[in-house]
Image (cartoon, helix red, strand yellow):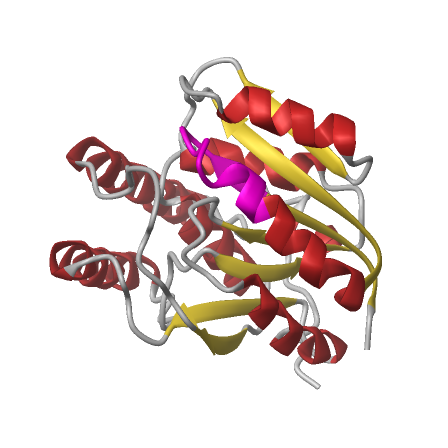
Amino acid sequence: MKLSSLTAFFPCYNEEANVKRMVTAFEKVLPQLAKKYEIIIINDGSSDKTGKIADRLSKQNPKVRVIHHPTNKGYGASLRSGFQHAKYDWIFFTDGDMQFDIAQLADFIPHTKNYDVIIGYRKRRADGSVRALNARLFKLYIDLLFRLHVKDIDCAFKLLKTTVVQPLPLQSTGAFTSSEMLYRLKKQGYKFQQLAVDHFPRKFGTPTGNHPKVVVKAGIEAFHVYLHAKLEQLRGASYGAPVKERTS
């Protein structure tokens, strides 16, 4: 089974050692999964050679596009850029750090018959005990606010129907963005298919997702979205029009 068309994108911030490897990994897998596809590199204001390498890859391959942020806007802003610029029927996004096996996307494709939102969860996190603890605490915080209750809210391995994601009025720009997207989709009545994926240690580059500023910003943005939702409820407005559940 192949998708009619697929946009695959990945955010990059100072990933000069990984960006070419990511594109190569996509090129090995995507022709088997989609009749038409594109690869978008989101260069989020990198200060190393990420942008130059991405531009060179784009010139060499017409299926590769690059979106440059002039300054570092954050992970969520990169996701929003990817959603906004996607031109095909389905969107797949992952991180640019080579911690996932792109080939496992093949396991997601059959579920597109019955679901518009297919999300991965890591069998075992490979980025250290401190970050794993922070992730568990953040998940508890999000579940207390939004009752989202997915297995791995920030797993960067998601396949989504483009028409479902692009209209979402996402507010956050940081690490909460992926969770906000899932929350809004849940409020609209979409059911999620959750599939296990492998997770590998980072070989090159420096992670930024566990920086205290990133964590604090995500917590603040989550609380702002929560307050906005509650205010809308008090005003008698629905937070996103319900849609017909699509589970089979």
Corner quadrant of residue 207: top left
11 falls in the magenta region: yes
Decide which of 77, 237 is in the foreground and name it: 77
Quarter of the image for the C terminus: give it.
Answer: bottom right
> How many discs mark residues in the rendered view?
0
54 magenta-colored: no
State the image quarter where residue 228 is shown: top left
Residue at 47% x, 48% y is 95
Q: Nearer the viewer, residue 130 or 205?
A: 205
Q: Classify the position of the N terminus by image quarter.
A: bottom right
Residue 62, x across and y down, in percent: 82, 35
Give residue 177's position: percent from left, percent from top.
43, 44
Q: Is residue 79 visible?
A: no
Q: Is residue 134 left or right of residue 189?
A: left
Q: Position of residue 239 (x, y in %)?
A: 52, 51
Whether 62 is drawn above or below 201: the answer is above
- Nearer-the-camera pick, 129 or 117: 129
Residue drawn where x is 38% and y is 56% of the image: 154
Magenta residues (range): 10-22
Residue 53 place in picture, x, y as percent:
58, 26
- Above or below — where is 54 with respect to 230? above
Name the residue at the bottom extreme: 248
